[in-house]
Image (cartoon, helix red, strand yellow):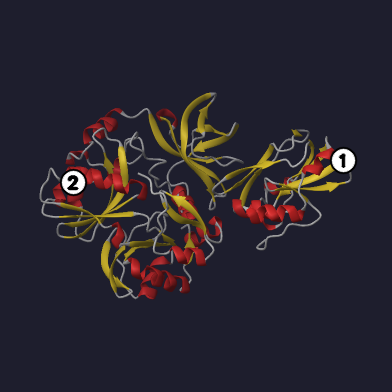
């Protein structure tokens, strides 16, 4: 199903007022940049930027069987998730293919919130709904309409948010109920940029007022363009590019969030991939000289095609082309020299270790 | 450059490229204000080789922003006699000064009469307002 008219977030007017370039993203009309991707990127690396990520989906899971149900469908050890905790997981099919990657937050008791990728939200809901029926006493609710989502990221993000919105923020990888704009909201110590920061899940009716307050406080509005360069510099996966149902978490480098002993859906296939290894591995790389890699570019070793770029861009921090590619497993070691075929030109590249960008200490 | 400008002394191609004639046999090419604004901040320019042949309406180079790649279309045919090497270190000149320091190549024209098919500044502005 595809929406004929793109959906708009509660901050649509704010984006237009700031002169944002808008693009269609997974059926949503979203800002790709305001002043420029580079400036926005650097604002997040050095100060604080905010992203409207209201296109992301939210699913509430509640009921006595919720912990057992989530333990079954999510790859991580959900039993280890305490109230107020946040946990990253893969949602796998029976063959271990990655249907989505997501954060689960334990809001309290047997109540959880899952934040989905917008392109996968409807599919995830269907999948979770089907599995939940085997567990009985658990409700899976689409609550995407209840929340606008604002990611405020950067070294100063927490301080500015706490001061401006007069709220106490939870530590990293935690979630806390707060009040903003006179309404209940959730503050999450998570993000997608490699910087400290918070993600705010707020009532759509007060989203514009919060956006305006943060703007006045000097937080720089940032679009999806900077969101992509920031996440790729720290090698965070983008589902649809670096993760797909045809790839398992092991080859994607996400074995760390898979606990096969919990018996999650797909755990057998994941255990086998971990034991036997995989033909290809997702590896970050840097272009050595000129050239910007793009999704779909072939990776070359000598004359042989040995893989494919799944994400590629120009890194504003490193000022060179960077990317991630699935490559033949024996070539995934950091330091390995490869070539990237960028529209017919061979660009020398080197497999690197994660993250590609490290904060100076 | 924040404001859209389309100098009157240039000829324009409908794919958002300009040509500045130098005598009867040479021309300098670049991309228009509209083209650089649509693309966003240019971070890489991949120039053609000196001596390469370019044909009117065909791609002769690439400019890339963080997000996108754009082929640059030759407004006229000829042979590349100079490329703007300064853009290797300062590709942002294409945004800051698209008709000056952001020029892309200089060409020795093989079919100077092709110029008659190009647009004047006024016609090009009309084309943009129709888009």
Seen in the image, is A206 located left or right of residue A112?
right
Rendered residue at 52%/29% (across/down): A300
Are discs 1 and 2 less than 8 Å apart at CB? no
Q: CA–CA distance between discs 1 and 2?
A: 74 Å
Q: For this rendering, which residue is in front, B33 or A192? A: B33
**Relative depth, front residue between A47 and B44:** B44
Foreground: disc 1 or disc 2: 1
The residue that label 2 is drawn on is: A71
Q: Report x, y in % for residue A354.
A: 42, 44
User: Which residue is painted at 65% across and 51% down in the image?
Assistant: B35
In the rendered image, residue A203, in percent from the top left (x then y), is placed at: 31, 67
Tally the numbered discs.
2
Res. A142 mark: none
Query: Is the same chain shared between marks 1 and 2?
Result: no
Tell me where residue A16 appears, x and y as whole percent: 50, 64
Write the residue at 40% across / 37% down. Answer: A282
Residue position for label 1: B25
Q: Is residue A24 left or right of residue A303?
A: left
* Residue A307 seen in the current view: yes
Rendered residue at 36%/74% (across/down)? A165
Residue A9 higher or lower than A273, as above or below = below
Residue B101 visible to an observer of this rendering = no
Nearest the eye: B73 or A165: B73
Side of A208 where A32 appears, left or right = right
Q: SS of the residue at dot 1? A: loop
């Amino acid at each position: 199903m595809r929406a004929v008219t793109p959906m708009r977030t509660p901050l649509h007017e704010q984006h237009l007022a700031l002169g944002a370039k808008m693009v269609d993203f997974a059926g949503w009309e979203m800002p790709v940049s305001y002043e420029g991707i580079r400036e926005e990127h650097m604002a997040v690396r050095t100060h604080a930027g905010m992203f409207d990520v209201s296109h992301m989906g939210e699913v509430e899971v509640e009921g006595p069987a919720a912990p057992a149900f989530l333990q079954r469908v999510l790859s991580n050890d959900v039993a280890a998730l305490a109230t107020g905790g946040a946990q990253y997981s893969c949602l796998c099919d029976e063959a271990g293919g990655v249907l989505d990657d997501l954060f689960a937050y334990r809001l309290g008791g047997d109540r959880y919130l899952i934040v989905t990728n917008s392109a996968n939200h409807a599919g995830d809901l269907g999948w979770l709904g089907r599995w939940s029926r085997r567990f009985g006493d658990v409700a899976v609710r689409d609550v995407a309409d209840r929340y606008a989502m604002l990611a405020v990221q950067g070294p100063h993000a927490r301080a500015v948010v706490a001061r401006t919105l007069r709220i106490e923020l939870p530590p990293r990888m935690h979630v806390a109920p707060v009040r903003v704009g006179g309404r209940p909201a959730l503050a999450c110590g998570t993000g997608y940029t490699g910087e400290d920061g918070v993600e705010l899940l707020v009532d759509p009716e007060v989203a514009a007022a919060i956006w305006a307050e943060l703007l006045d406080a000097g937080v720089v509005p940032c679009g999806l363009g900077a969101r992509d360069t920031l996440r790729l510099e720290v090698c965070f996966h983008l589902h649809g590019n670096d993760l797909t149902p045809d790839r398992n978490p092991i080859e994607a480098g996400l074995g760390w969030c898979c606990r096969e002993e919990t018996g999650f859906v797909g755990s057998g296939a994941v255990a086998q991939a971990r034991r036997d290894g995989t033909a290809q591995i997702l590896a970050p790389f840097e272009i050595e000289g000129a050239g910007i890699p793009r999704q779909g570019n072939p990776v070359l070793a000598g004359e042989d095609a040995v893989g494919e770029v799944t994400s590629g861009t120009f890194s504003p921090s490193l000022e060179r082309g960077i990317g991630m590619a699935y490559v033949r497993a024996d070539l995934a070691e950091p330091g390995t020299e490869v070539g990237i075929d960028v529209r017919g030109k061979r660009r020398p590249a080197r497999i690197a270790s994660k993250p590609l960008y490290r904060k100076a200490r | 450059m924040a404001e859209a400008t389309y100098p009157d002394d240039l000829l324009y191609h409908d794919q958002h490229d300009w040509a500045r004639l130098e005598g009867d046999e040479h021309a300098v090419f670049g991309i228009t204000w509209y083209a650089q604004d649509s693309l966003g901040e240019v971070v890489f320019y991949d120039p053609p080789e000196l001596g390469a042949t370019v044909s009117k309406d065909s791609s002769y180079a690439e400019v890339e922003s963080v997000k996108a790649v754009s082929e640059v279309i030759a407004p006229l045919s000829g042979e590349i006699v100079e490329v703007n090497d300064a853009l290797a270190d300062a590709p942002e000149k294409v945004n800051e000064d698209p008709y000056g320091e952001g020029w892309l190549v200089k060409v020795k024209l093989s079919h100077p009469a092709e110029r008659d098919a190009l647009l004047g500044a006024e016609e090009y502005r009309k084309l943009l307002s129709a888009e």
